[in-house]
Image (spheres, rainbow, N blue to C red):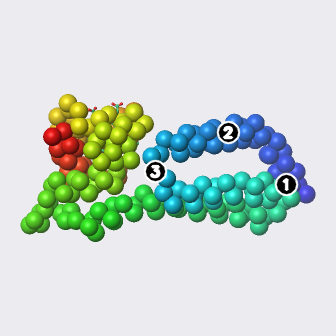
């Protein structure tokens, strides 16, 4: 009984922050979804998992049913796992499809860059660099030199994500070379 009391005290204490965080969570999710040019199957599965987790958690905690609460937590873990998975999937697609090792004979910097560009960059910059989603600069009209382009891809800028952790140095160099080539 003590533990149940503690739980209900804890629940009361967290009620306001919980409402604020949930509303912010849903709003930012909505805005980001709105800005995505295309929504993949994984994303829909993640959304369904998160949305299903909410009533399960509410009912689980109201009725004090551990199974429902655990199920709800599991759904959140699954959607997190899916997010991690789809983060690594593109890289495997690239390395499987083209020669990605510059020391190998027949390595083509532009082809490597193009493959990376199509996976990581087209959602905001478009195939031709001019899509301009989420305020992305038109790459066909960019005046930056190679070093500056490499710097922006590596470290990001405003809504432009940083790729320091996602892409290897050589991959950044290749996609930068390809981005410069979009100007012609
Ligand atoms: C989430 C959207 C998004 C993605 C994905 C994205 N970018 Fe960007 N990119 C932006 C935005 C927004 C800017 C403008 C940043 C600023 O100056 O405020 C930008 C700017 C740039 C610039 C600088 C252009 C200039 O003239 O200032 C380069 C180069 C660039 N992006 C290359 C890339 C490459 C290469 C990729 C893929 C590895 C990529 N971007 C992926 C949103 C994105």
Q: Is residue 27 left or right of residue 19?
A: left
Mark 1, Cα crowd under 10 Å, few <14 / some 14-19 / many 20+, is few
Which circle's residue, 2 or 3, is located before the other in the chain? 2
2 or 3: mark nearer the eye: 3
Residue 112, image x, y percentages: 21, 57
Q: Which mark is residue 62?
A: 1
Q: Is residue 138 left or right of residue 16?
A: left
Q: Which residue is mark 3?
A: 38
Residue at x 23%, y 37% (from the top left corner): 140
- The image quadrant in which ligand 1 is located: top left
Residue at x 28%, y 51% (from the top left corner): 117
For the image shown, how many numbered marks are present on the structure?
3
Q: Which mark is residue 23?
A: 2
- Regarding mark 2 in the picture, which secondary structure is present there? helix
Q: Quadrant of residue 155?
A: top left
- Regarding mark 1 in the picture, which secondary structure is present there? helix
Cα separation between marks 2 and 1: 20 Å
Q: Residue furthest right?
A: 1
Which circle's residue, 2 or 1, is located before the other in the chain? 2
Q: Residue furthest left?
A: 105
Mark 3, Cα crowd under 10 Å, few <14 / some 14-19 / many 20+, is few
Residue 161, image x, y percentages: 38, 42
Q: Is residue 171 above or below residue 144?
A: below
Residue 145, image x, y percentages: 17, 34
């Amino acid at each position: 009984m003590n533990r149940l009391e503690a739980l209900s005290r804890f629940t009361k204490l967290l009620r306001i922050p919980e409402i604020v965080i949930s509303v912010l969570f849903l709003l930012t999710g909505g805005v980001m979804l709105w800005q995505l040019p295309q929504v993949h199957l994984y994303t829909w599965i993640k959304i369904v998992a998160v949305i299903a987790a909410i009533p399960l958690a509410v009912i689980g905690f109201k009725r004090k049913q551990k199974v429902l609460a655990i199920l709800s937590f599991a759904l959140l873990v699954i959607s997190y796992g899916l997010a991690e998975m789809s983060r690594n999937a593109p890289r495997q697609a690239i390395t499987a499809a083209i020669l990605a090792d510059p020391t190998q004979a027949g390595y083509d910097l532009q082809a490597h860059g193009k493959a990376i560009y199509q996976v990581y960059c087209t959602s905001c910059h478009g195939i031709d660099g001019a899509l301009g989603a989420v305020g992305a600069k038109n790459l066909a009209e960019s005046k930056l030199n190679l070093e500056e382009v490499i710097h922006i891809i590596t470290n990001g800028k405003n809504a432009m994500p940083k790729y320091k952790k996602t892409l290897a140095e050589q991959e950044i160099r290749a996609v930068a070379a390809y981005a410069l080539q979009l100007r012609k």
